[in-house]
């Protein structure tokens, strides 16, 4: 399965989130540099940049990508040059394939 070429599909709820085992499997296959949080309900990654300007450019790129994909992460700009991203599917309060698709695409920025 090539997730980089897939597009996020809307999840309106009514679906089960990925199990911890499923999330761990996708993590190890596709986004080893991300980590699972909150008992595998969220994907998390921290990014560090040279300065505020670089961090802000990255945040804006993530925002544009999220809009294109129709899947929106929680983005935190911390201490002017650090960016933390939490990915999860809000409608099901857990992880869905979309979260891994977006994580892979964020890694390419």
Image (cartoon, rainbow, N blue to C red):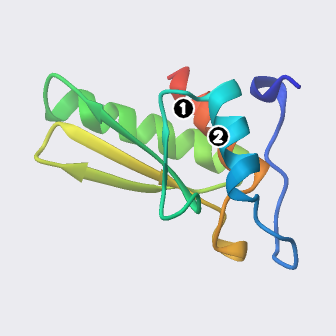
Q: Mark 1 points at which residue?
A: 106
Q: Mark 2 points at which residue?
A: 102
Write the residue at 37% across / 32% down.
Answer: 58
On the picture, is 46 further left or further right than 101?
Answer: left
Vertically, is 95 above or below 29?
Answer: below
Q: Can residue 95 be seen in this view?
A: yes
Q: Position of residue 80 (x, y in %)?
A: 12, 43
Which of the 4 image quarters holds residue 51? top left
Vertically, is 3 above or below 77?
Answer: above
Vertically, is 97 above or below 32?
Answer: below
Vertically, is 22 above or below 109?
Answer: below
Question: Dot 2: what SS?
Answer: helix
Write the residue at 76% across / 58% down.
Answer: 18
Q: How crowded is mark 2: few (under 14 residues within 10 Å), some or many (20 or more)?
A: many
Disc 1 vs disc 2: Cβ atoms closer than 8 Å? yes
Which of the 4 image quarters holds residue 1? top right
- Looking at the rendered structure, the number of numbered marks drawn on it comes to 2
Q: Position of residue 93 (x, y in %)?
A: 64, 73
Q: Where is residue 77 in the image (x, y as percent from the top left)?
A: 25, 50
Q: Where is residue 99 in the image (x, y as percent from the top left)?
A: 66, 48
Q: Which of 20 and 8 is in front in this view?
A: 20
On the picture, is 18 further left or further right than 79?
Answer: right
What label sits on residue 34 in the rendered view? none
């Amino acid at each position: 399965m090539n997730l980089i070429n897939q597009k996020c599909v809307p999840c309106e709820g009514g679906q089960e989130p990925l199990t911890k085992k499923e999330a761990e499997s996708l993590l190890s296959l596709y986004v080893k540099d991300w980590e699972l949080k909150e008992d595998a309900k969220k994907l998390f990654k921290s990014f560090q940049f040279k300065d505020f300007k670089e961090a802000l450019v990255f945040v804006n790129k993530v925002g544009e990508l999220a809009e294109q994909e129709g899947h929106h992460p929680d983005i935190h700009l911390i201490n002017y040059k650090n960016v933390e991203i939490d990915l999860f599917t809000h409608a099901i309060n857990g992880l869905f394939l979309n979260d891994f698709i977006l994580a892979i695409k964020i890694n390419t920025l």
